[in-house]
Image (cartoon, helix red, strand yellow):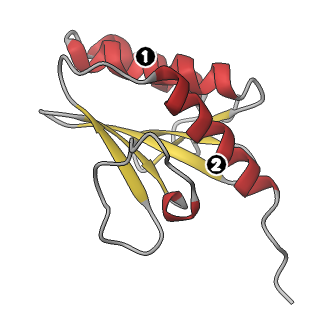
Amino acid sequence: MTPDTDSGVPASQLIDAKIEGMKDWRGETLAKIRALIRQADPEVIEEWKWDIPVWSHAGIICTGETYKNAVKTTFPKGASLDDPAGLFNSSLEGNVRRAIDFKEGEPIDEAAFIALIKAAVVLNSTKTKPK
């Protein structure tokens, strides 16, 4: 468990509290996304940065942000990932990051999301060293 640097509270507990504090579909969606990330990468490290959940493995895989109309997962290196299922639907204009906005009532393509998480872990784990 990685503690939040400011409070000393383990990140996993802060994420638990965030999920439990949202008494609507957003809490359920964030919990589902978290479970899929853990399923895809059992060695994932949960962190709490910028007042949001962050999942890492050899670098940041994605973040979990909650908004009024969406739960967003932002992949800081998303533009470098293959997305054959077309999950990325936000932050498409940039050269580096990509995001997925999950909206109320929309199903999550679990297999495609797990594949994206695994691809992000591989990308982080095989990044080339600067010369």
Residue 47 visible? The answer is no
Q: CA distance from mark 2 to mark 1?
A: 20 Å
Residue 104, label in figure? none
Mark 2 Cα-neighbour bin, 10 Å: few <14, some 14–19, many ≥20: many
Residue 12 visible? The answer is yes
Report the quarter where the N terminus lies: top right
Measured as percent of width and height from the top left, residue 4 is found at 57, 39
Front residue of this view, candidates 56 and 114: 114
Q: Is residue 130 left or right of residue 3?
A: right
Residue 120, label in figure? 2
Front residue of this view, candidates 24 and 11: 24
Residue at point 61%, 51% (across, down): 60
Amino acid type, residue under disc 2 in the picture:
Ala
Mark 1 Cα-neighbour bin, 10 Å: few <14, some 14–19, many ≥20: some
Residue that extends furthest to the bottom in the rendered view of this protein: 131
Residue 95: quadrant of the picture:
bottom left
Q: Is residue 125 above or below residue 87?
A: below
Residue at point 50%, 57% (across, down): 78
Report the quarter where the C terminus lies: bottom right
Q: Is residue 76 left or right of residue 126?
A: left
Residue 27: quadrant of the picture:
top left
Residue that extends furthest to the left in the rendered view of this protein: 68
Q: Is residue 39 above or below residue 43?
A: above
Measured as percent of width and height from the top left, residue 10 is found at 61, 27
Q: Secondary structure at mark 1?
A: helix
Residue at point 42%, 50% (across, down): 50
Q: Is residue 27 above or below residue 99?
A: above
Say whether disc 2 or disc 1 marks the residue closer to the N-terminus: 1
